[in-house]
Image (tube, helix red, strand yellow):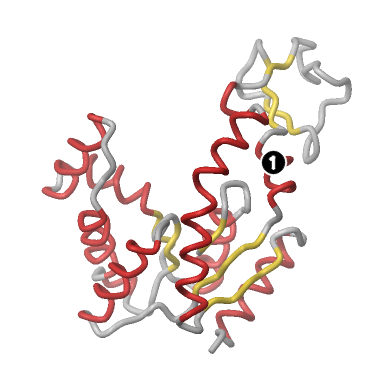
Amino acid sequence: MVGAPGAGKGTQAALLAERLRIPHVASGDLFRDNIKRGTALGKKVKGYLETGALVPDSLTVQMIADRLGQPDAAEGAILDGFPRTRPQAEALDAMLAKAGGRVAAALYVDVPREALLRRLSGRWICTAAPDHVYHSVARPPKVAGVCDVDGAPLYQREDDKPATITARLELQLPPMYEVVDYYTERDVLSIVDGEQDVVEVTDTLLRAIAQPAR
């Protein structure tokens, strides 16, 4: 799965995994699981995360290799959150080739930058109850700036503000486009309109998997 923050690729990855009956393998979940279980890889990853350093691609690829080697992934898996850069995509391909596998389809959930900004910067939270969450487009409050449940003012977290979101996208989109180019060059990329209804996106992705680009 390839897509920018806010494109909905995580949601779609989970839906595809359920429909196809194959595991949804998210790199962030792998990190947390290995750290929780105290595996050798988890201990190494924890050291990097605690110091704020980037986890080396080799460790992430090894975690993915171990996960794909489990019985439930014998028929494949949906990879979510990795690769994020061209070098990571190259490392993933090399790992899969050694195991006699390959990336059968790279699914790019395409959403325009302006729509991403609307999605990511639309969240508002109740000052009295943090679990009362609204979205200016998808789930607006009945009265702007006021919680429907308790009438408390709503606020926006710093990392949900447009300026912060714009800066985040400026950092994350260029390497993602390199991944898109990489899989385009290998004739396995399918581009799906992420502005469709969630069900329509899922159906389009399933058709792309059944008839991957070549």
Residue 203 in the image: x percent, y percent? 68, 73
Mark 1: few/some/many CA within 10 Å (<14, 14-19, 20+): some
Against 188, is 199 above or below? above
Q: Is residue 214 left or right of residue 60?
A: right
Q: Position of residue 117 (x, y in %)?
A: 69, 41
Residue pointed to by mark 1: 117
Residue 34 in the image: above or below residue 51:
below
Which residue: 73% across, 29% down?
134
Q: Is residue 197 above or below residue 104?
A: above
Name the residue rendered at 56%, 58% in the picture: 3
Q: Residue drawn at (53%, 89%), measured in percent from left and top?
A: 214
Q: Quadrant of residue 32?
A: top left
Pick out the residue farthest to the left.
Answer: 40
Specify the amino acid type for callout 1: Leu
User: Is 178 on the left or on the right of 61, as rendered?
Assistant: right
Give the image quarter of residue 68. bottom left
Percent x, y of residue 78: 45, 67
Regarding mark 1 in the picture, which secondary structure is present there? Answer: helix
Left or right: 58 in relation to 21: left
Q: Position of residue 22 (x, y in %)?
A: 43, 70
Quarter holding residue 19: bottom right
As rendered, which of 108 and 127 lies closer to the eye? Answer: 108
Residue placed most toward the observer, 208 or 182: 182
